[in-house]
Image: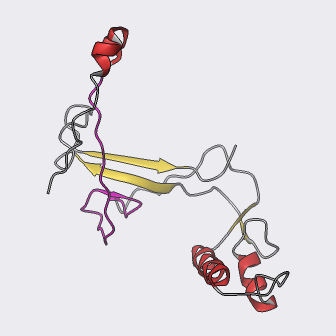
């Protein structure tokens, strides 16, 4: 079901006519939870990628060693923290048990048990949009897919 943005409460161009030359069509996305496939437009979902083409990496991060964190460790650490904040505890008591602290530290980028990674850092899929799902999205002639990838490492 297509969703639309409600009418603006004020006519911005009438109030600020000098902005008229800067006006552009905007596409507002309405993401929903789901299980997208590579054949779907999605935010954070899988990308349609040629099997014989290598996955892109961050070119500015070819240092000999990087440290990453396993995604499953991050998810588990977040769940443990959410549960810890929700349970009652005495004034001044530790938020986490010693066992939970080990897991949460492992899931932290500043933790002591980070995963060493040699070689280039893989880029992370952010969004994939098919032209058929977003007809107003501008693009070069003959293209029907926009993919945005992100380099997760700061420069």
How many numbered circles does the render carry?
A: 0
Foreground pick, 103 / 38:
103
Q: Nearer the viewer, residue 94 or 57?
A: 94
Q: Position of residue 111 (x, y in %)?
A: 79, 71
The answer to whether 86 appears left or right of 142 in the picture is right
Q: Check if residue 47 falls in the magenta segment.
A: yes
**Position in image of residue 135 (x %, y %):** 17, 41
The residues colored magenta run 24-49
Q: Is residue 140 left or right of residue 16?
A: left
Residue 21, can we see it?
A: no
- Establish if 12 lies above or below 3: above
Where residue 150 sits: x, y (%)?
52, 49
Corner quadrant of residue 143: top left
Residue at 61 percent of width and 75 percent of height: 78
Residue 78 vs 139, above or below: the answer is below
Name the residue located 71 percent from the left edge and 63 percent from the top edge: 118
Quadrant (top left/top right/bottom left/bottom right) for the N terminus? bottom left
39 part of magenta stretch: yes
Q: Identify the residue shown where x is 29% and y is 53%.
A: 30
Residue occupying the far top of the picture: 18
Q: What type of secondary structure mainly makes up the magenta span?
A: loop
**Residue 67 seen:** yes
Residue 40 position in % (x across, y down): 25, 61
Residue at the spot 22% in from the left edge and 41% down from the top edge: 6
């Amino acid at each position: 079901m297509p969703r639309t943005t409600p009418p603006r409460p004020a006519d911005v161009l009438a109030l600020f006519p000098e902005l008229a030359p800067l006006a552009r069509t905007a596409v507002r996305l309405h993401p929903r939870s789901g299980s997208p496939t590579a054949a779907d437009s999605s935010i954070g979902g899988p990308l349609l990628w040629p099997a014989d083409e290598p996955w892109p990496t961050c070119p500015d991060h070819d240092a000999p060693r990087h440290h990453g964190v396993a995604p499953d460790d991050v998810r588990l650490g977040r769940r443990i923290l959410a549960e810890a904040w929700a349970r009652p505890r005495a004034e001044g008591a530790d938020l986490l048990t010693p066992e939970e602290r080990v897991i949460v530290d492992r899931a932290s980028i500043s933790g002591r048990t980070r995963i060493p990674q040699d070689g280039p850092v893989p880029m992370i899929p952010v969004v994939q949009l098919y032209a058929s799902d977003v007809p107003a999205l501008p693009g070069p002639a003959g293209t029907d897919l926009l993919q945005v990838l992100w380099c997760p490492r700061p420069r």
